[in-house]
Image: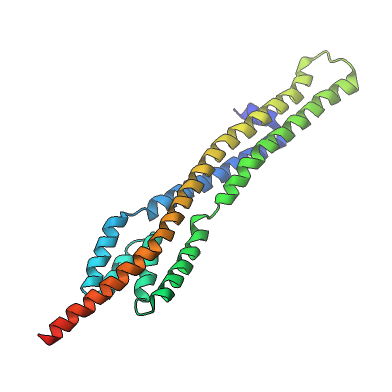
Amino acid sequence: MIDFIVKGGLVLWLIMALSAVGVAIVVERLLYLRRIRVDEEKLFLRIKNSLEKGHFDEALAICDQNVSPLSGLMRVGIEHRDYPESVQKEVLKDAAAQEVPRLEKNISALGTIAHIAPLLGLLGTVTGTMKAFGVLGRFGSVADPSILARGVSEALITTVGGIVVAVPAVIFYNYLVTKVNLILVKMENQVNALVLMINASRRKARSAAGEGGEA
């Protein structure tokens, strides 16, 4: 393995560095997506029950117990419950937009790695071929094939290395982009649902409080 790396030359070391960065990004993003995963229906129901009872602090505490973008949106909506519905929608849309950088963190870097890795492999192919032809140019003919083989080995090894890094990087990049886009679409759809739920729960809580006062 060490001999394989040595034969790949400087370009292969660059490809390996990119692969290490790519693995770190993939692991961090997968752990992040796992951490923010939440049962949306259950969360909606818990907060709705608290809001209908007028327990706004309890609803906010439930939001604080979850680190998902949905719980963050719901917290913003609850905090702005006394504003007009049009203002609530704008505030929630702004809050959803602020979640985008956190969701897309380092994903573009992974896409860049997926594009750069095969190009570096191609660069290694060119430099390795140049070395091989340089040997032929200096000596005309080579008695020891191993001298010529060094350049050819570098060319082939860096090509393989670039492809090996690029393929999984492309796969995980597309997977992460799809997951993030799905979350963003859900968040956009949840804005109106949140406004309706918060205002309906607020009216119901006020109605219940009024009936209790009359009694």
Left or right of 91? Residue 75 is left
What residue appears at the point 29 percent right and 66 percent down from the top-left corner? 62
The C terminus: image quadrant: bottom left
Front in this rendered view, residue 80 or 146: 80
The N terminus: image quadrant: top right
Left or right of 205? Residue 12 is right
The answer to whether residue 167 is above or below residue 147 is: below
Q: Quadrant of residue 91?
A: bottom left
Residue 196 visible in the shown view = yes
What residue appears at the point 54 percent right and 44 percent down from the top-left corner? 173
Front in this rendered view, residue 155 or 142: 155
Q: Name, please, the residue furthest toward the top.
A: 143
Left or right of 161? Residue 59 is left
* Residue 147 point in image, percent of width and height: 78, 20
* Residue 109 point in image, percent of width and height: 59, 49
What residue appears at the point 26 percent right and 57 percent down from the top-left corner? 42
* Residue 96 point in image, percent of width and height: 46, 64
Q: Name, please, the residue furthest toward the bottom.
A: 214
- Please state the total of marks drawn on the protein image: 0
Q: Quadrant of residue 7?
A: top right
What residue appears at the point 86 percent right and 20 percent down from the top-left corner? 136
* Residue 58 point in image, percent of width and height: 26, 71
Residue 54 visible in the shown view = no
Q: How is the image coloured?
A: rainbow
